[in-house]
Amino acid sequence: MTTAAPPVSTNLRDDILALKEERNAVILAHNYQIAAIQEIADYCGDSLGLAFRAQETDAEVIAFCGVHFMAETAKIINPEKTVVLPDANAGCSLEESCPAPELEAFLKENEEKNYYVITYINSSAAVKALSDVICTSGNAVRIVEAAPKDRPILFAPDQNLGEWVAKQTGRKMDFWKGNCYVHVEFTRESITRIKEEHPDAAVVAHPECTTAVRLLADEVCSTEKMVDFCRDSESQNIIVVTEAGMLHRLQREVPEKNLIPGPTDRCACAECRYMKMNTLEKLYLCLRDLKPEVTLEEDLRKNAEAPILRMLELSK
Ligand code: 13P
Ligand code: SF4
């Protein structure tokens, strides 16, 4: 009796690296990816760093280990490249909270307001295409500060990030009511409890957390800026209030610090089910088969590209 050969060899790491060479590919990974993917990636970072890397690369293929909107963003600014992602179902609750037809209808109903629409990168290409400028958590303050003073701002789709940036800049704005289902799981109670267990620890939190949680933090910033905060902090113990994958990135960068995952009311840490859909095996397969591939209709791509390029220009 013959048994079928396994689709993927057991030496996955080497096979991925060999395929990467063969395809002239670059592997980009978000800080929330599983450890094995972070370690094999050419670059691991936050949404802003990843967008810049995607813009700069001269590889022919981008294997994007993150969620769909991130790979889609890479494709929008690289129409000539092949962009693949390990799992096409890796979505995002923020993207889901803002369907393009709903945003379009809202803007039509409020046409007389002439909103300047600032949209978080965690959104679909169709929503980006309706926006004036895109932002990430790493540059939201700068993007809002650069917005025209004579137009009201609509900030979509993350209300928590919007409220944080409004506070930072003193700029009034209207909010789309979306949220990240992972970050809203942290509560004032869960973070107060862990602070009581580690009274000397500093707390760093992502701006997608609720106001009640952000108020307990010593620093609120994007995942990439958390690396600098942990390195520069005088505290030996640091409570990290964001998705659990970040702990691996931080442990690699700042091994001398004791990093404590922020708990939720239900769990000792918080994981994004979408980010965790990607595996080494799926990464191998997407490089081997060049699918799932991100493709976009050209008109939509062009309309979505302009606000992303505006963001990248303003962030240099
Ligand atoms: P940053 O890594 O840009 O801070 O974003 C976090 C996030 O939720 C990505 O989905
Ligand atoms: Fe979306 Fe939240 Fe997951 Fe980031 S962590 S991909 S914002 S659901």
Image: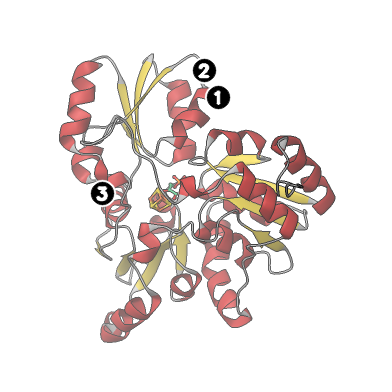
Do the numbered discs 1 and 3 sit on residues whose CB atoms are within 8 Å?
A: no
Tell me which residue sits at (18%, 41%) in the image. 212
Tag 2: amino acid: Pro
Tell me which residue sits at (26%, 49%) in the image. 167
In the rendered image, which residue does mark 3 sit on? 167
Tag 3: amino acid: Lys
Q: Position of residue 16 (x, y in %)?
A: 73, 43
Tell me which residue sits at (65%, 59%) in the image. 84
Crowding around mark 2 (Cα neighbors within 10 Å: few <14, some 14 to 19, many 20+) is few
Q: Position of residue 74 (x, y in %)?
A: 61, 60
Q: Choose top left, top right, bottom left or bottom right for residue 104.
A: bottom left
Tell me which residue sits at (49%, 60%) in the image. 89
Distance from the alpha carbon under mark 1 to that under mark 2: 6 Å
Tag count: 3
Q: Position of residue 140 (x, y in %)?
A: 41, 52
Q: Is residue 313 visible?
A: yes
Instruction: For mark 2, give the secondary structure.
Output: loop
In the rendered image, which residue does mark 1 sit on? 252
Q: Position of residue 39 (x, y in %)?
A: 62, 33
Horizontal side, residue 231 vs residue 24: left or right: left
Q: Nearer the viewer, residue 250 or 174?
A: 250
**What colouring method underlies this structural image?**
secondary structure
- The label shown at residue 255 is 2
Tag 1: amino acid: Arg
Do the numbered discs 1 and 2 sit on residues whose CB atoms are within 8 Å?
A: yes
Above or below: residue 63 compared with residue 303: above
Q: Nearer the viewer, residue 58 or 244?
A: 244
Front tag of 3 and 2: 2
